[in-house]
Amino acid sequence: MSDPYVIAEHVSKHFHVLSQRGTTFRAIKAFLKREPLMKKLNVLSHVSFEMKRGEKIAIVGKNGAGKTTLLRILAGIYEPSSGEVYTEIAPKVLLNFWTGFNMDLTVIDNVYLCGALFGGERKLLARSLPRILEMAELSTLGYSPAKRLSLGQIQRLSLSIFLNTPGDFLIFDECLAFVDKGFARKSDAFIKEHISDHKTAIMASHDGEFLKKHCTRAIWLDKGSIRMDGEARRVISEYESVVSGEATE
Amino acid sequence: MMKNRPKQLFTRANWNLLVELIRAQFKLIDHNSLLGFLWSSLGPLAMFAVTYAIFSVRFGKNIAAYPLYLLSGIVVVNFFVNATLQVMQSFCAAMPLMLNTTAPRKIILIANVGIVLYKFLLELLFCVAISFFYGKLSLKMLVLAIPILLAFIAFILGISSMLALCNCLVRDVEHLWTLLSRVFFFITPVFYELKDISSWASKLVYFANPLTPFMVSLRSLLMGSFDAMSFGYSLLWGVFFFALGLGAFGLLEDTAVERA
């Protein structure tokens, strides 16, 4: 661990959300009357941190705390409204496990399509195909349309493609939310192997045990700001105790 | 260290993604069957048959090879209308992809034009065959068609990117454009010649409708002649709209995606 791998400097993000459904007529009316059609929504406020190569950071926080927005900014999907983000290399991102799938295509076609979204080339994916299908437990369903798969099977396939494409900097969000316990154990071992020492990862999840197992450090986001940043077990335990305390109140 | 958003568009990974996106759409288009392709080709052919039946006597009597004249016009307008609509609809439909993956938005835009382009090129090939049948085809004309085609694709990309942005910001643009695009069949010389209409109307159709020079220049090549003015004018429109679309997309893509 040496130089910073990711730098986030005073990252803030606000969105302009429509106060009503946008139509051409309403847009013209708002323009003529000089009334705002949008209202401002602050999501992140002055988030700063540095990350070293090989670090695994967990992002925790309640729904709406800004976890996904922060991950999207780190991935380069959103531009920050103010502040800067620098990364050593482009990350490989899994924020939503069904994105990129075309349900009318076969499972194998979807491996190539999703693999390309994760930066994998066809030749490499063709070589990894048996391993991807085996890990997803879909070896016999390669030529079935993806629409025949269950939600859990699609998630397994997505995770399997993600973990079998190259990338040293990983960003993922809630990737084990709907899978059965058997696959969760399997992918747990696979994630452990995949995000080995030299890989850098940022992950968000509501599963504290999963995060404690895989992360060395955690950042607790609360209402768009960093509430706590430190050793993973300590931050996650503190977050969980506050959340469960609020729930009993 | 680099800023978190890479600037380079045509990296090896992005090129690979573009190929996979187009390949995936090809597998779905017309149910991946010859019969499906023939069914979808019936649309322009039916349009051709009806238009020919109605206008061949009134407008076609002074035009040599009127079937070729008419079909090439229909093919050009169809490509323009289908490509703009496809990009507009698919770009908004691809919002989950743009919000959850690092796929460059321009690649998604280009992939959607690529899908319609394939059909246009096949239809154009059919026109080339008819031109050969009429004995009007020459190698020189085919070579001259390449820069016009490239300019036409650039023009379509420029217009489509601006429409896709507008549709993300104001969702009924798609419905308005669906209605408006039908007008292009009449305000572009698909079934008539510019000399058939009044002088002011022909000037309006030629200079105010950017689609006209592309149609006139491509068609004149297929009919065995070369219209230098339309050729130059097409290249100019192509470059202008491409630059405009690219500039607008660069400025507004984040806003459009965040507000869609």
Image: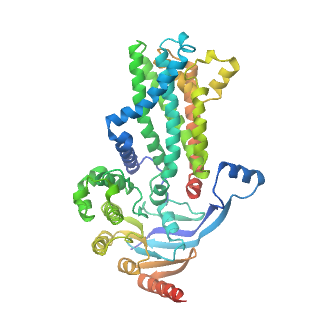
Residue A128: image location, x then y, percent:
25, 57
Pick whichever, B222 or A86, lies toward us.
Answer: B222
Q: Is residue B250 above or below residue A246?
A: above
Q: Quadrant of the C terminus of chain A?
A: bottom right
Name which residue lies at 55% across and 21% down: B191
Name which residue lies at 58% across and 48% down: B167
Name which residue lies at 53% across and 60% down: A78
Q: Where on the picture, by quarter, is residue B194? A: top right
Q: Quadrant of the N terminus of chain A?
A: bottom left
Pick whichever, B47 or A162, lies toward us.
Answer: B47
Q: How many marks?
A: 0
Name which residue lies at 57% across and 73% down: A224
Pick whichever, B256 or B201, lies toward us.
Answer: B201
Q: Is residue B188 above or below residue A70?
A: above
The reply to whether residue A16 is in sight is yes
Residue A9: image location, x then y, percent:
55, 69
The reply to whether residue A120 is in sight is no
Q: Is residue B232 above or below residue A30?
A: above
User: How are the colours assigned in the image?
Assistant: rainbow
Q: Is residue B121 above or below residue B168?
A: above
